Image (tube, rainbow, N blue to C red):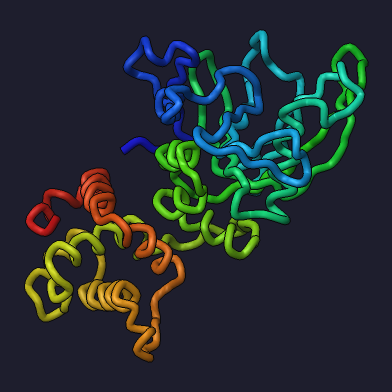
């Protein structure tokens, strides 16, 4: 499965991605227009394929389906002189805009305008705010993914170049959604969609959907938290097993429960409990007065796959293979 994973490096062939089979960036972002993300600049974005959206902040600029930010750590013809700061410890990135001193108005630069627009949408119209992904260019044709981000703050600041020149620019404080893998199909689906909400429902990380609903920014990890046993990966695999085999397969009295629990490395009673949570929301038993005891993130995951089980089957099998669960679970998948 193609994924952008924090800290992992990717090969980017830029405008030559069609000539190489090893491209892991531009070729992953080709949408129904037949085009990928533009290959030049630190602030990259494109338009929706079939719709146009404008915000009240900058009505002359269309809202993009997503934004790619690139901090170049090597010298190139198109490098920015700005010193971006990427802190994995705090979960924050300081990113300078694209002003270079040639224009008096900081909003005359397309990158500044796009990010300022995204900041405005964070506060006023989150349902159409573009997700922002940040990468570092560490070598020619090689990128490192630093995470899915949102803009927490922006300010005007002055950057002093080595020759003594001072240039006013915008400086954006980005919050990183911690430990999230990003499916590039989400970005492509957004570009192709007539409603970004539909694309989010099918492919977006749960944390993104929760942010759109609540507006609560991701918090940095002050201390390392214990990993969730029942995360999206296990829940996706279990959901397909239940669809495919019936809910009784997870009962702790069923012999299949022992096999599935061992493969997923969970307790048999925990497997039974999670299956009941899935069944409860899937069948909307709350409408009959029964209290739901599962998590909101599980509700979001179930609703994501409810419209089309083909996606659930495909993703569950891919996850099972990546996690080395597939061989043990092949009779249930």
Q: In this rendering, is residue 302 above or below 326?
A: below
Image position, residue 247 (x, y; %): 17, 73
Q: Is residue 226 left or right of residue 151?
A: left
Rendering quarter of residue 24: top left
- Asked whether 196 or 179 is in front, the reply is 196
Residue in the foreground of this view, choosing between 219 and 199: 199
Instruction: Please determine whether, in this image, residue 87 is positioned above or below residue 316.
Output: above
Q: Nearer the viewer, residue 252 or 66?
A: 66
Q: Is residue 204 visible?
A: no
Task: Tell me where residue 7 appears, x and y as whole percent.
Answer: 49, 36
| Residue found 67% across the figure and 8% down from its top | 77
Quarter of the picture containing the C terminus is bottom left
Q: Which residue corresponds to the image point at 88% horizontal and 34% vertical from the top-left?
A: 157
Residue 45 falls left or right of residue 197: right
The quarter of the picture where the N terminus appears is top left
The structure residue drawn at horizontal position 72% and vertical position 56%, both measured from the top left corner, is 124
> Left or right: where does residue 319 sit relative to residue 228?
left
Residue located 19% across and 64% down the image = 243
Expressed as whole percent of the image width and height from the top left, the position of residue 129 reads: 62, 47
Horizontally, residue 206 falls left or right of residue 169, namely left
């Amino acid at each position: 499965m193609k994924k952008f994973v924090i800290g992992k490096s990717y090969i980017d062939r830029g405008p030559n991605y069609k000539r190489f089979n090893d491209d892991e960036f531009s070729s992953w972002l080709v949408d129904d227009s037949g085009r990928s993300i533009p290959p030049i600049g630190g602030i990259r974005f494109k338009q929706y394929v079939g719709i146009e959206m404008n915000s009240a902040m900058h009505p002359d600029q269309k809202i993009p389906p997503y934004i790619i930010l690139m901090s170049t750590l090597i010298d190139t013809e198109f490098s920015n002189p700005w010193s971006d700061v990427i802190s994995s410890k705090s979960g924050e990135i300081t990113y300078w805009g694209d002003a270079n001193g040639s224009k008096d108005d900081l909003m005359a630069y397309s990158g500044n305008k796009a990010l300022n627009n995204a900041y405005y949408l964070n506060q006023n119209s989150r349902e159409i705010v573009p997700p922002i992904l940040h990468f570092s260019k560490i070598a020619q044709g090689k990128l490192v993914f630093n995470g899915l981000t949102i803009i927490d703050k922006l300010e005007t600041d002055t950057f002093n170049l080595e020759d003594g020149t001072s240039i006013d620019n915008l400086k954006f404080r980005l919050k990183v959604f911690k430990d999230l893998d990003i499916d590039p199909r989400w970005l492509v689906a957004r570009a192709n969609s007539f409603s970004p909400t539909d694309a989010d429902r099918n492919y977006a990380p749960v944390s993104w959907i929760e942010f759109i609903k609540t507006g609560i920014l991701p918090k940095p990890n002050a201390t390392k938290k214990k990993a969730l046993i029942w995360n999206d990966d296990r829940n996706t695999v279990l959901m397909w097993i239940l669809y495919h085999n019936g809910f009784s397969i997870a009962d702790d009295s069923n012999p299949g429960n022992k096999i599935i629990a061992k493969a997923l490395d969970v307790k048999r009673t925990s497997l039974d409990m999670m299956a009941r949570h899935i069944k409860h929301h899937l069948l909307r038993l709350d409408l009959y007065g029964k209290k739901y005891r599962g998590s909101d993130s599980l509700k979001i995951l179930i609703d994501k796959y409810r419209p089309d089980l083909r996606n659930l089957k495909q993703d569950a099998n891919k996850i099972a293979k990546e996690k080395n669960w597939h061989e043990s679970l092949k009779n249930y998948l």
